[in-house]
Amino acid sequence: MILAAIRSQPAFLAGIIFIGLVIFIGIFGSWLAPQDPFLLHPDKVNQAGSAAHWLGTDEFGRDLLSRLLIGVQPTLMVAIGATAIAGFFGTFVGIAGAYGRPLASFLIMRGIDVMLSFPPILLALLAVGFWESGVLSLAVVIGVLYIPHFARVAHAATLQVTRMEFMEAERAMGASTWRVVFTAILPNILSPLVVQATLTVAAAILLESGLSFLGLGIVPPEPSWGQMIGTARGYLGQNPMYVIWPSLLLALTVLAINVVGDRLRDILDPRLREE
Amino acid sequence: MLEVKNLSIGFRTHAGLKSAVRNIDFTVRPGEIVGLVGESGSGKTITSLGVMGLLPPNAVVTGGEVLVDGVDILKLSAAELRKLRGRHVAMVFQDPMASLDPIFTCGDQIVEAILLHEPIGRANACKKARELLEKVRIPDPDRAMRSYPHELSGGQCQRIMIAMAVACKPRIIIADEPTTALDVTVQKQVLELLRALNKEVGAAVLLITHDLGVIYEVADRVVVMYAGNKMEEATTADLFAAPQNDYSRALIDSMPSPGKYEDRLPVIERDADGNIRSVRPEPKVKASPVPVAIKDETPILELRDLCKSYWVKPSPLSTPVEMRAVDQVSLTIAPRTTLGLVGESGCGKSTLSRVVMRLLEPSAGQILFKGKDIAKLPESQMRPFRRELAMVFQNPYGSLNPRHSVADLVEAPMAIFSDGDSASRQERVRTLIEAVGLPTTAAQKYPHEFSGGQRQRIAIARALALKPSLVICDEAVSALDVSVQAQVLNLLKDLQAEFDLTYLFISHDLSVVEHVSDTVAVMQKGKVVECGTASAIFSNPQEPYTRMLLEAVPTIGTPRCEKEGA
């Protein structure tokens, strides 16, 4: 099924290859880096691309390409970890909010509303302030922050599904709550959740960059894309390519995830499968 | 005058042009009502859209002309066509609630329709709109002018639609299934209105429907369509008296008609040469002799004073008022029989079925299932009874989980009760799929790959998976075409003989209920007003309400006066 889709959809294939490449770099980034990403060259700061430094150097003269490559790992771990946490808990909170007992649903959904009423960056600042910064705590904090978004989407989709006749049919057959949730609700609310997940990966990378920019994310000198974009803003005049390279990679990654997520959603839906 | 000459329409697909309608010819003269009848997929709606110039983007007219007073509308530009619509050609759609804009008052919408084509000023248009509402006999036209569509009933909304359609005295009115969404009694009124208005306005009316009864009531001439071809064109009297075409005859035969009891309904079949014929299947006979029903056997289901109330607030600040959807209903169903439950929409018959299934909690009363009261049982103790009770829902498109294959769907009840191992369940799924007349290859497919009738078969297979003793069919054939409906009704009867089933058959269609039922209960406003054997109720109704329902059914063959005496 997926193989057939790859053959007929060049964009899907390109997306998968790109994501595969990014994950490969995430794992082997430190071996792939052509130069020491932490070595300072005070004489060669903010240079444009050259034979020695293909993509140029940053404000301390460190090799940009090497830093970009090893920056993939923390970026990906935060983004995917956060999305997984938000997706798993958010979906079940949302389903509980729509399908649970009235009082529990009310409390859950109002709690979600309270969480949503704070800007995520503010809550992230608060949380990161208490914990030590690092990849794991960052992933958990960003993941928790995006739970309400998933919960809202899952809640709305579940409400729609619970009004369908086949839900009544399940209950008439005497299906247990677990069965209803896993076989009737979950597969039918998957489409909006997949879209939400691709959006959350992108948003998590951006939030990570924001937090790194504020010095709360990945601790320097360890690089991450978000942190690089944040720092590079200050040197926009001297070396415009410094901000463009990580931004371009970030945009391409998010685009690839969106394309793949979109196609996956269609492939998973039997109604949209082509004969 | 509307003339359709040699009209052919095709759909653009990946595999090239797929023909949907071929060489359709007919004429509708002013003051005449022509019925266009056919099953779903026969191309009748595509034909009507072609006539309105409203074809979907992937459809192309491959030949022929549509002449409105001599002008070929297929050659007109979009702007010219727009002028023609409304003034010359008006349309009445199937779902009146959905065709009216919910955020404008009905009055505004009629005024708007008038002003679009006749710049006579808002005050005059308002006056005209009110006159129109009087003409379509809406009770209290002033209130209707001020009302939003959701504040009116379906029948009233359809009257508003008709008022809008006749607002600019169009020459041609196309009515696409105008009464399908309405109750029989309302349907009768709307059809009478359509007929009377047609006499007055003198428009040419093209009435599209799948209901032969409706055609019989109002149409002057009939065009029968099947699979994109015109099968027959005849005056209504001729068609029903002596159908010339095999398909027309088969279609007329497959309708259950009141007052004529048959064991199985004839169904439409195509033989190897592609000829269409009507076949009356032989009733399936069980191998083992059927146990004779004993008179004093305990009924399988007995309802005693069952009530279900809702508390509604008439206005936001007032105290809630009790609204009884099911009001002290007492019924009994003997084993291996069918109880038909009829009534208009909103009479509480669906609520009753859900209370019996315990999908809704009864407010009071008893539900005795095989002598044991299940009305107050908690869900955990209800479980063994869920094996015995099964339900077939109205909408075969909504009652099957679209993410599951047919095998998963049919296996679901067995999986829920962990009945047998995987292999034996698969075996049972195969047997069931065959029993409901689907090919075994169907198991791996998904519901969206089937037609409405086939989906209803899947739903029936699922209902039978645990060998239940009582099956509740809630409007199980209402969403289906007449010919498909005949097949499903035959299937239900065959399965009843084969598996010793008891049915609670809920329907608004009296002829269907008469065909399947042994006993019949008539519901009105939550109460059972009349209950008795099918033959007694249909031949000698006691209650005025039952009589009114029966009279409203559009019937083929017998003229009204004769039906009264029958």
Image (tube, coloured by chain):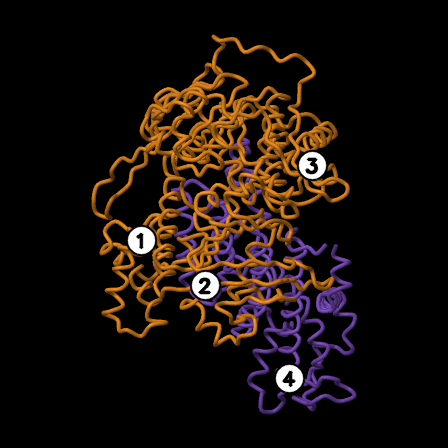
Chain colours: A purple, B orange
> What residue is pinned by disc 3?
B438
Do labels 3 and 1 touch, CB within 8 Å? Answer: no
Q: Amino acid at mark 1?
A: Val
Q: Amino acid at mark 2?
A: Leu
Residue A158 seen: yes
Disc 3 from disc 4: Cα separation: 65 Å
Task: From the image, state whether disc 2 or disc 1 is nearer to you.
Answer: 1
Q: Nearer the viewer, residue A80 or A272?
A: A272
- Give the quadrant of the N terminus of chain A: bottom right
Do labels 2 and 1 touch, CB within 8 Å? Answer: no
Q: Using the rendered image, report if marks 2 and 1 lie on a common chain.
A: no
Q: Using the image, name the chain to which the residue with label 1 belongs.
A: B
Counting other residues with Cα less than 10 Å from the Cα at mark 3, is it few (<14), some (14-19), or many (20 or more)? some
Q: Using the image, name the chain to which the residue with label 3 belongs.
A: B
Disc 4 from disc 1: Cα separation: 74 Å
Q: Using the image, name the chain to which the residue with label 2 belongs.
A: A
Task: From the image, state whether disc 4 or disc 1 is nearer to you.
Answer: 1
Q: Using the image, name the chain to which the residue with label 4 belongs.
A: A
Disc 3 from disc 1: Cα separation: 47 Å
Q: Amino acid at mark 3?
A: Leu
Q: Using the rendered image, report if marks 4 and 1 lie on a common chain.
A: no
Q: Amino acid at mark 4?
A: Tyr
- Residue at point 58%, 61% (across, down): A195
Sequence-first tag of 2 and 4: 2
- Residue at point 49%, 37% (across, down): B556
> How far across and down, in percent of the image, does residue B55 sit?
56, 64
> What residue is pinned by disc 1?
B136
Q: Which disc, if any, is residue A115?
A: none
Disc 2 from disc 1: Cα separation: 62 Å
> What residue is pinned by disc 2?
A123
